[in-house]
Image (cartoon, helix red, strand yellow):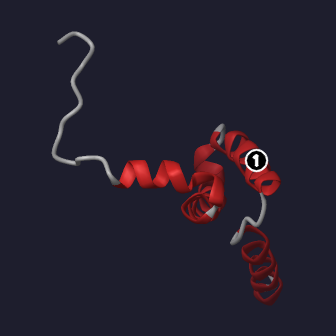
Amino acid sequence: MDFSDVKNRAILLFAQTEFIWSEQQYDMALELMDQLINEYDLNRPLIDILSNAIEKYENQATEFVEFNRSVADLDNSVALKSSDE
């Protein structure tokens, strides 16, 4: 096995999956995540990389600002009640 080739491929993979720049790329990343999860154990390293990129985008994208603010404003000490109560 040529480890320098593996390293170069990994560098390219990380460069392509580390950042999501647009809503279109975000949608494509979510679609890919749905596919990867079907074989979770096989795809776990890529799932980890992609989930980090998705999380970064969701934390920084303007379309999520209001949602992120509302989540941050939630009272963490209040437990959710079940619908049976």
Q: Is residue 83 above or below residue 73?
A: above
For this rendering, which residue is in front, 15 or 9? Answer: 15
Q: Residue furthest top?
A: 84
Residue 58 placement: quadrant: bottom right
Dot 1 falls on a residue whose secondary structure is: helix
Q: Is residue 81 above or below residue 20?
A: above
Residue at (76, 47) in percent of width and height: 27
Q: Is residue 62 above or below residue 7?
A: above
Total tally of numbered discs in the picture:
1
Q: Is residue 52 left or right of residue 83?
A: right
For this rendering, which residue is in front, 5 or 21? Answer: 21
Residue at (30, 47) in percent of width and height: 74
Amino acid found under the numbered disc labelled 1: Asp
For this rendering, which residue is in front, 54 or 34? Answer: 54
Q: Residue furthest front?
A: 66
Residue 10 placement: quadrant: bottom right
For this rendering, which residue is in front, 24 or 41? Answer: 24
Residue at (73, 54) in percent of width and height: 26
Q: Quadrant of the N terminus?
A: bottom right
Where is mark 1, residue-wise? 27
Residue 30, how many percent across, how many down? 70, 46
Q: Is residue 14 above or below residue 49?
A: below
Q: Quadrant of the C terminus?
A: top left
- Assess disc 1: are there few (<14), some (14-19) or many (≥20) residues with their C-alpha within 10 Å of its C-alpha: few
Residue 39 placement: quadrant: top right
Residue 44, how many percent across, how many down? 59, 55
Q: Residue furthest bottom?
A: 4
Q: Is residue 24 left or right of residue 60?
A: right
Residue 43, how many percent across, how many down? 65, 53
